[in-house]
Amino acid sequence: MSEPRKIIIDTDPGQDDAAAIMLALGSPELDILGITTVAGNVPLTLTSRNARIILEFCGRPDVKVFAGADKPVARPLITAEHVHGKTGLDGPELHDPQMPLQAQHAVDFIIETLKREPAGTVTLCTLGPLSNIATALEKAPEIAGRVRELVMMGGGFFEGGNITPAAEFNIYVDPEAAATVFKSGIPIVMMPLDVTHKVLTLKSRVAKLREIGSRPAIALVEMLDFFERFDIEKYGSDGGPLHDPTVIAYLLKPELFSGRDCNVEVEAASPLTVGMTVVDWWQVTGRKHNARVMKDVDADGFFALLTERVGRL
């Protein structure tokens, strides 16, 4: 087997972030160098707490957690307790984590790690607003050329938005940060709502996770049971979209996804469409490609992978 792929997970947990972290922990192909937290679904103190709770559910207190930006780079924080509950991980009974937060700031950890590891070996997996990554790029622009790939959950195009008619939550929270990242020259793979709305937590799929019966699997099922309530009401579907694990699934099995190289620009000025990812899907502008934008996914293959890997925890 080839060397495990080195990744940093930048996250704002969230129940679907928990599923993504569990998928990564259950996959020996990935070497998690650290988890960095950002304010997003809930404020930073909670996202930093939640990341450690998830690691302890999985028996992995050895993975270090670094707290990062407590607000977007240029605007006040908007959170999503209405989706994720007041803790951000509502569903299971939560304990106070025993493992410590690292003293180092997430942005400094990202910069130091990218400078230390050989160029082109570290992948950034972003599951929340891009505040930490943009701040790292502002502070040390030279790291852009050292990133192997940045795989993000964010944006939407054909599906529109989920926090406003035009914008997906992660991009909407910090559009300036997203604009910085898309202009950075880092190779980007984007998992928009167009993909994540096709991976629904159908009852039959959650039942397979429940059958695993382990502590991590049961915690995840309890989170998904809570998380789904909001989405079932909103989308009228049997189960809600499972956004963030698509990022990790892509690293493990890229063949589950299809899309194309496009130019993506982020709207940061218009009150009507702030946070919109303007994807040049039909190549009408002549603007340079800056992201591989995914549009389709093999949802059954995705859930089979998630179930198998959570089963290893």
Image: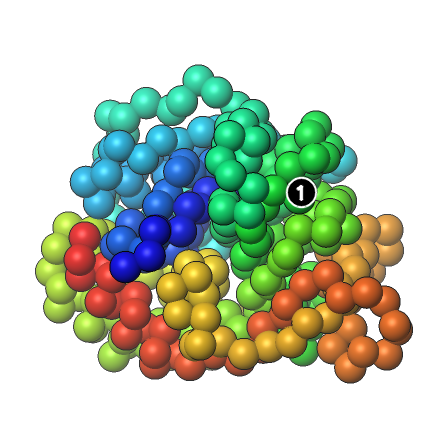
Q: Position of residue 219 (x, y in %)?
A: 23, 52
Q: Position of residue 68 (x, y in %)?
A: 54, 30
| Residue 278 found in image quarter | bottom right
At x 45%, y 29%, the residue is 66
Residue at the disc numbered 1: 144
In the shown orientation, is residue 270 left or right of residue 306? right
3 in relation to 245, above or below: above
Q: How many marks?
A: 1
At x 43%, y 77%, the residue is 256
Q: Position of residue 73 (x, y in %)?
A: 71, 35
Give amino acid for label 1.
Ala
Colour mode of the rendering: rainbow
Q: Nearer the viewer, residue 306 or 82?
A: 306
Residue 20 in view: yes
| Residue 26 found in image quarter | bottom left
Which quadrant: the N terminus? bottom left
